[in-house]
Image (tube, helix red, strand yellow):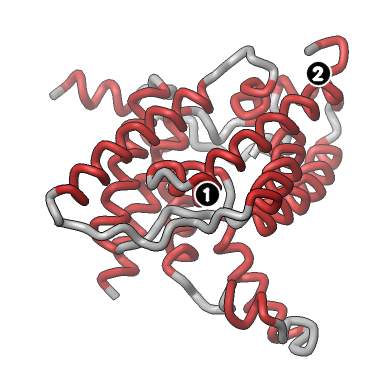
Protein backbone atom coordinates (compact mmCIF):
# COMPACT_ATOMS: atom_id res chain seq x y z
CA UNK A 1 0.00 0.00 0.00
CA UNK A 2 2.82 2.37 0.90
CA UNK A 3 4.43 1.61 -2.42
CA UNK A 4 1.20 2.62 -4.17
CA UNK A 5 0.99 5.91 -2.27
CA UNK A 6 4.65 6.58 -2.99
CA UNK A 7 4.02 5.96 -6.67
CA UNK A 8 1.02 8.32 -6.72
CA UNK A 9 3.24 11.03 -5.25
CA UNK A 10 5.82 10.59 -8.00
CA UNK A 11 6.03 13.55 -10.35
CA UNK A 12 6.19 11.49 -13.50
CA UNK A 13 4.68 8.10 -14.04
CA UNK A 14 5.57 5.61 -16.65
CA UNK A 15 3.44 6.72 -19.61
CA UNK A 16 2.25 3.13 -19.96
CA UNK A 17 0.68 3.20 -16.49
CA UNK A 18 -0.85 6.64 -16.99
CA UNK A 19 -2.10 5.42 -20.37
CA UNK A 20 -3.63 2.38 -18.71
CA UNK A 21 -5.51 4.70 -16.36
CA UNK A 22 -6.70 6.68 -19.37
CA UNK A 23 -7.93 3.45 -20.95
CA UNK A 24 -9.96 2.60 -17.85
CA UNK A 25 -11.45 6.11 -17.87
CA UNK A 26 -12.33 5.70 -21.54
CA UNK A 27 -14.13 2.42 -20.86
CA UNK A 28 -15.99 3.87 -17.87
CA UNK A 29 -17.10 6.92 -19.88
CA UNK A 30 -18.78 4.67 -22.42
CA UNK A 31 -20.09 2.14 -19.91
CA UNK A 32 -21.51 4.63 -17.40
CA UNK A 33 -22.42 7.68 -19.48
CA UNK A 34 -22.44 6.38 -23.06
CA UNK A 35 -20.17 9.31 -23.90
CA UNK A 36 -16.74 9.80 -25.39
CA UNK A 37 -13.90 11.73 -23.82
CA UNK A 38 -13.54 14.91 -25.81
CA UNK A 39 -11.97 18.26 -25.13
CA UNK A 40 -12.04 20.47 -28.21
CA UNK A 41 -15.80 20.23 -28.70
CA UNK A 42 -16.42 21.76 -25.28
CA UNK A 43 -14.64 24.96 -26.33
CA UNK A 44 -16.93 25.17 -29.33
CA UNK A 45 -19.99 24.72 -27.11
CA UNK A 46 -18.73 27.54 -24.90
CA UNK A 47 -17.81 29.72 -27.88
CA UNK A 48 -21.32 29.13 -29.19
CA UNK A 49 -22.84 30.24 -25.89
CA UNK A 50 -20.82 33.45 -25.91
CA UNK A 51 -21.42 34.00 -29.63
CA UNK A 52 -25.18 33.63 -29.30
CA UNK A 53 -25.16 36.55 -26.90
CA UNK A 54 -22.74 38.89 -28.70
CA UNK A 55 -23.52 38.16 -32.36
CA UNK A 56 -26.70 36.08 -32.58
CA UNK A 57 -27.00 36.46 -36.37
CA UNK A 58 -23.48 35.28 -37.04
CA UNK A 59 -23.92 32.25 -34.82
CA UNK A 60 -27.37 31.38 -36.15
CA UNK A 61 -26.13 28.67 -38.50
CA UNK A 62 -26.27 24.92 -38.94
CA UNK A 63 -23.02 24.34 -37.11
CA UNK A 64 -23.84 26.13 -33.90
CA UNK A 65 -27.54 25.25 -33.95
CA UNK A 66 -27.24 21.52 -34.46
CA UNK A 67 -23.70 20.16 -34.49
CA UNK A 68 -22.14 22.09 -31.61
CA UNK A 69 -25.08 23.18 -29.52
CA UNK A 70 -24.41 26.24 -27.36
CA UNK A 71 -25.12 24.63 -24.01
CA UNK A 72 -23.36 23.05 -21.06
CA UNK A 73 -22.79 19.58 -22.46
CA UNK A 74 -21.33 16.49 -20.83
CA UNK A 75 -18.01 17.37 -22.46
CA UNK A 76 -17.96 20.84 -20.90
CA UNK A 77 -18.33 19.32 -17.43
CA UNK A 78 -15.66 16.79 -18.32
CA UNK A 79 -13.32 19.64 -19.18
CA UNK A 80 -13.88 21.23 -15.77
CA UNK A 81 -12.97 17.86 -14.28
CA UNK A 82 -9.82 17.68 -16.40
CA UNK A 83 -8.72 21.06 -15.11
CA UNK A 84 -9.08 20.07 -11.47
CA UNK A 85 -7.78 16.55 -12.06
CA UNK A 86 -4.63 17.93 -13.60
CA UNK A 87 -4.21 20.30 -10.70
CA UNK A 88 -4.77 17.44 -8.27
CA UNK A 89 -2.10 15.42 -10.07
CA UNK A 90 0.38 18.25 -9.64
CA UNK A 91 -0.71 18.66 -6.03
CA UNK A 92 0.04 15.02 -5.17
CA UNK A 93 3.56 15.37 -6.53
CA UNK A 94 4.02 18.76 -4.89
CA UNK A 95 4.64 20.51 -8.20
CA UNK A 96 1.50 22.67 -8.17
CA UNK A 97 2.50 26.26 -8.73
CA UNK A 98 1.57 29.29 -10.82
CA UNK A 99 4.23 29.87 -13.41
CA UNK A 100 4.48 32.75 -15.86
CA UNK A 101 7.82 32.08 -17.47
CA UNK A 102 7.95 29.58 -20.33
CA UNK A 103 9.37 26.08 -20.24
CA UNK A 104 13.17 25.71 -20.34
CA UNK A 105 13.13 24.06 -23.73
CA UNK A 106 10.89 26.88 -25.00
CA UNK A 107 13.30 29.62 -23.96
CA UNK A 108 16.14 27.99 -25.89
CA UNK A 109 14.19 28.44 -29.11
CA UNK A 110 11.92 31.43 -28.63
CA UNK A 111 13.71 33.40 -25.94
CA UNK A 112 12.70 34.45 -22.49
CA UNK A 113 9.81 36.77 -23.25
CA UNK A 114 6.65 35.45 -21.66
CA UNK A 115 4.42 37.35 -24.13
CA UNK A 116 5.99 35.48 -27.02
CA UNK A 117 4.79 32.34 -25.29
CA UNK A 118 1.32 33.76 -24.78
CA UNK A 119 1.03 35.05 -28.36
CA UNK A 120 2.17 31.79 -29.92
CA UNK A 121 -0.03 29.83 -27.54
CA UNK A 122 -3.03 31.97 -28.52
CA UNK A 123 -2.36 31.79 -32.24
CA UNK A 124 -1.45 28.09 -32.12
CA UNK A 125 -4.55 27.26 -30.11
CA UNK A 126 -6.74 28.89 -32.77
CA UNK A 127 -5.02 26.80 -35.47
CA UNK A 128 -5.43 23.72 -33.30
CA UNK A 129 -9.11 24.31 -32.65
CA UNK A 130 -9.87 24.98 -36.32
CA UNK A 131 -8.13 21.73 -37.21
CA UNK A 132 -10.10 19.86 -34.56
CA UNK A 133 -13.32 21.44 -35.82
CA UNK A 134 -12.70 20.31 -39.39
CA UNK A 135 -11.58 16.81 -38.43
CA UNK A 136 -14.40 16.29 -35.94
CA UNK A 137 -12.33 15.99 -32.79
CA UNK A 138 -8.95 16.43 -31.16
CA UNK A 139 -6.36 14.07 -29.73
CA UNK A 140 -8.68 12.87 -26.99
CA UNK A 141 -12.08 13.07 -28.65
CA UNK A 142 -11.14 11.69 -32.04
CA UNK A 143 -7.73 10.01 -31.89
CA UNK A 144 -8.16 8.20 -28.57
CA UNK A 145 -11.94 7.88 -28.18
CA UNK A 146 -12.49 7.17 -31.85
CA UNK A 147 -9.46 4.93 -32.01
CA UNK A 148 -10.70 2.72 -29.20
CA UNK A 149 -13.90 2.13 -31.16
CA UNK A 150 -11.72 1.43 -34.20
CA UNK A 151 -13.12 4.36 -36.18
CA UNK A 152 -11.08 4.85 -39.37
CA UNK A 153 -11.40 8.64 -38.90
CA UNK A 154 -9.20 8.44 -35.80
CA UNK A 155 -6.30 6.79 -37.58
CA UNK A 156 -6.46 9.13 -40.57
CA UNK A 157 -6.41 12.02 -38.09
CA UNK A 158 -3.41 10.61 -36.20
CA UNK A 159 -1.50 10.23 -39.47
CA UNK A 160 -2.22 13.85 -40.43
CA UNK A 161 -1.43 15.15 -36.96
CA UNK A 162 1.99 13.51 -36.83
CA UNK A 163 2.89 14.38 -40.42
CA UNK A 164 2.34 18.10 -39.94
CA UNK A 165 3.55 18.07 -36.33
CA UNK A 166 6.91 16.66 -37.37
CA UNK A 167 7.25 19.18 -40.20
CA UNK A 168 6.33 22.06 -37.89
CA UNK A 169 8.83 20.91 -35.27
CA UNK A 170 11.48 20.63 -37.99
CA UNK A 171 10.83 24.22 -39.05
CA UNK A 172 10.68 25.58 -35.51
CA UNK A 173 13.79 23.75 -34.29
CA UNK A 174 15.78 23.92 -37.55
CA UNK A 175 19.39 23.01 -36.68
CA UNK A 176 18.47 21.95 -33.18
CA UNK A 177 16.05 19.23 -34.30
CA UNK B 1 -27.37 15.23 -12.60
CA UNK B 2 -25.67 11.91 -11.86
CA UNK B 3 -24.36 12.05 -15.39
CA UNK B 4 -22.74 15.43 -14.72
CA UNK B 5 -21.10 14.21 -11.52
CA UNK B 6 -19.76 11.26 -13.48
CA UNK B 7 -18.42 13.64 -16.12
CA UNK B 8 -16.67 15.65 -13.43
CA UNK B 9 -15.09 12.57 -11.83
CA UNK B 10 -14.09 10.98 -15.13
CA UNK B 11 -12.67 14.30 -16.27
CA UNK B 12 -10.66 14.56 -13.07
CA UNK B 13 -9.24 11.07 -13.59
CA UNK B 14 -8.45 11.99 -17.20
CA UNK B 15 -6.67 15.18 -16.16
CA UNK B 16 -4.82 13.30 -13.43
CA UNK B 17 -3.52 10.72 -15.90
CA UNK B 18 -2.47 13.48 -18.33
CA UNK B 19 -0.58 15.25 -15.58
CA UNK B 20 1.15 12.09 -14.37
CA UNK B 21 2.20 11.19 -17.90
CA UNK B 22 3.75 14.66 -18.13
CA UNK B 23 1.56 15.69 -21.06
CA UNK B 24 0.72 18.98 -19.41
CA UNK B 25 4.26 20.09 -20.22
CA UNK B 26 5.36 21.84 -23.39
CA UNK B 27 8.50 19.80 -23.98
CA UNK B 28 6.71 16.45 -23.68
CA UNK B 29 4.30 17.28 -26.50
CA UNK B 30 6.89 18.85 -28.79
CA UNK B 31 9.53 16.18 -28.25
CA UNK B 32 7.31 13.46 -29.62
CA UNK B 33 7.55 15.28 -32.95
CA UNK B 34 11.34 15.43 -32.58
CA UNK B 35 11.53 11.73 -31.68
CA UNK B 36 13.44 12.53 -28.50
CA UNK B 37 10.68 11.57 -26.04
CA UNK B 38 7.88 9.28 -27.13
CA UNK B 39 5.78 9.62 -23.95
CA UNK B 40 2.79 10.98 -25.90
CA UNK B 41 2.72 7.95 -28.17
CA UNK B 42 3.25 5.49 -25.33
CA UNK B 43 0.45 7.16 -23.37
CA UNK B 44 -1.96 7.25 -26.29
CA UNK B 45 -1.28 3.75 -27.49
CA UNK B 46 -1.47 2.09 -24.09
CA UNK B 47 -4.69 4.00 -23.44
CA UNK B 48 -6.05 2.80 -26.77
CA UNK B 49 -5.12 -0.83 -26.14
CA UNK B 50 -6.58 -0.94 -22.63
CA UNK B 51 -9.83 0.74 -23.63
CA UNK B 52 -10.18 -1.34 -26.78
CA UNK B 53 -9.89 -4.56 -24.80
CA UNK B 54 -12.32 -3.30 -22.16
CA UNK B 55 -14.89 -1.94 -24.59
CA UNK B 56 -14.89 -4.90 -26.95
CA UNK B 57 -15.11 -7.32 -24.01
CA UNK B 58 -18.08 -5.44 -22.52
CA UNK B 59 -19.73 -5.29 -25.95
CA UNK B 60 -19.18 -9.02 -26.41
CA UNK B 61 -20.88 -9.72 -23.07
CA UNK B 62 -23.77 -7.48 -24.08
CA UNK B 63 -23.20 -5.03 -21.23
CA UNK B 64 -22.80 -1.95 -23.41
CA UNK B 65 -23.70 -0.65 -26.83
CA UNK B 66 -21.20 1.53 -28.61
CA UNK B 67 -22.02 5.23 -28.83
CA UNK B 68 -22.03 6.77 -32.29
CA UNK B 69 -18.55 6.48 -33.72
CA UNK B 70 -16.86 9.71 -34.93
CA UNK B 71 -17.75 10.16 -38.59
CA UNK B 72 -15.22 9.26 -41.25
CA UNK B 73 -14.80 11.75 -44.08
CA UNK B 74 -11.30 11.11 -45.33
CA UNK B 75 -10.38 14.55 -46.65
CA UNK B 76 -11.82 16.35 -43.61
CA UNK B 77 -10.16 14.04 -41.10
CA UNK B 78 -6.84 14.29 -42.88
CA UNK B 79 -6.87 18.05 -43.49
CA UNK B 80 -8.10 18.65 -39.96
CA UNK B 81 -5.33 16.46 -38.65
CA UNK B 82 -2.74 18.33 -40.71
CA UNK B 83 -3.90 21.71 -39.37
CA UNK B 84 -4.18 20.35 -35.85
CA UNK B 85 -0.61 19.05 -35.89
CA UNK B 86 0.75 22.53 -36.69
CA UNK B 87 -1.04 24.01 -33.69
CA UNK B 88 0.01 21.16 -31.45
CA UNK B 89 3.70 21.41 -32.34
CA UNK B 90 3.67 25.20 -31.94
CA UNK B 91 1.89 25.45 -28.61
CA UNK B 92 2.80 22.17 -27.00
CA UNK B 93 -0.76 21.48 -25.86
Label 2: how many Cα within 10 Å (few below 14, some 14–19, many 20+)? few
Image position of B39 with respect to A57: above or below: above
Chain under numbered label 2 = A
| Residue sitting nearer the eye, A133 or A120 | A133
Outermost residue toward the bottom in this view? A57
Residue at 21% of width from left, 58% of height from top? B64
- Name the element at disc 1: helix
User: In this rendering, would A58 be left or right of A35?
Assistant: right
Q: Position of residue A157 (x, y in %)?
A: 61, 42
Q: Residue A108: which disc?
A: 2
Q: Position of residue B50 (x, y in %)?
A: 30, 34
Residue at 63% of width from left, 78% of height from top? A49
Q: Position of residue B51 (x, y in %)?
A: 31, 40
Q: Pick whichever of labels 1 and 2 is earlier in the sequence.
A: 2
| Residue sitting nearer the eye, A159 or B91 | A159
User: In this rendering, would A27 be left or right of A113?
Assistant: left
Residue A98 in view (yes/no): yes
| Residue sitting nearer the eye, A63 or A169 | A63
Residue A102 in view (yes/no): no
Image position of A84 with respect to B36: above or below: below
Image position of A55 with respect to A172: above or below: below
- Are the residues tagged 1 and 2 within 8 Å (C-beta)? no
Residue at 65% of width from left, 77% of height from top? A64
- Name the element at disc 2: helix
Q: Residue A142: which disc?
A: 1
User: In this rendering, would A41 be left or right of A125?
Assistant: left
Amino acid sequence: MNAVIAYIKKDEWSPYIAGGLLGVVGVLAVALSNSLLGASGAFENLAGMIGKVIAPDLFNNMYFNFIMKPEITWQVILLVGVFFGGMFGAFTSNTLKIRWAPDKQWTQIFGNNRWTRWDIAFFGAIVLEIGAGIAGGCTSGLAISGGMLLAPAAYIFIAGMFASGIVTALIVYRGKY
Amino acid sequence: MTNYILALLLGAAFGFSLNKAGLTKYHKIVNVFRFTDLAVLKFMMSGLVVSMIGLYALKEFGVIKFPSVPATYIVGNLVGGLIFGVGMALTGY
